[in-house]
Image (cartoon, rainbow, N blue to C red):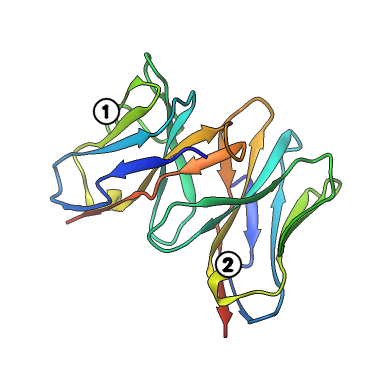
Amino acid sequence: SAVISQKPSRDICQRGTSLTIQCQVDSQVTMMFWYRQQPGQSLTLIATANQGSEATYESGFVIDKFPISRPNLTFSTLTVSNMSPEDSSIYLCSVEDRGGTAGYTFGSGTRLTVV
Amino acid sequence: QQQVKQSPQSLIVQKGGISIINCAYENTAFDYFPWYQQFPGKGPALLIAIRPDVSEKKEGRFTISFNKSAKQFSLHIMDSQPGDSATYFCAASLMGDYKLSFGAGTTVTVRA
């Protein structure tokens, strides 16, 4: 299975600021995704990170709030912009893992608290 | 609108008992049904998955039962152990689409 390194693992940020989360994969992958998991809740897909083109956002998520970069097949970043306490969540990177269990592998997540 | 409904929200089982988690879906186009296990502070990890052409899949102590006509599937954890205490999510995806729709999650506590 692909191994995902996600940074930072946690952060406490002031409202109005931005945080960039990094996702590094140990092998080239076609599909990379960003999810949000609010406290005690399920996972919600934010967007699909496309290499060489703009990310594809799900309903309720916009590029101005969650800009995503995907410069190559092993790396992506998610920025949470102009944060408010409602953005406090766990943000997870995920990749389609055809080479391993033929499923989706998740990173350990970034636990974000906005104060 | 949640496309996959999961129950119960939580359950407590004694060591050695059977944990059963149920999921129901509406979209008959779904063709991949994975279960994920998540420990606190970790991302979800794929536990077991099934496609609709089989009614049951077993891997060790974990079994998925799939009822296509009822649009339901369930996870059975046999001989539950304290190390199985975690949150379990069912999910589904569409043929040709890589998006996963997750259930709300079930927190399982196995008491020694």
- The disc placed on residue A11 is none
- Identify residue for label 1: A64
Q: Are there few (<14), some (14-19), or many (20+) residues within 10 Å of tag 1?
A: few
Q: Residue sitting at 83 percent across and 46 percent down?
A: B68
Please provide percent x and percent y for residue B11.
60, 74
Task: Establish if A25 lies above or below A83.
Answer: above
Q: Nearer the viewer, residue B75 or A28?
A: A28
Q: Nearer the viewer, residue A46 or B52?
A: B52
State the quadrant of the C terminus of chain A.
Answer: bottom left
Q: Chain of mark 1?
A: A
Q: Chain of mark 2?
A: B
Task: Using the rendered image, report if marks 2 and 1 lie on a common chain.
Answer: no
Q: Residue sitting at 72 percent across and 74 percent down?
A: B18
Q: Residue sitting at 28 percent across and 51 percent down?
A: A9
Task: Establish if B63 lies above or below A16.
Answer: below
- The answer to whether residue B101 is visible is yes
- The disc placed on residue B9 is 2
Instruction: Residue type at mark 1: give it.
Output: Asp
- The answer to whether residue B1 is visible is no
Secondary structure at badge 1 equals loop
Secondary structure at badge 2 equals loop
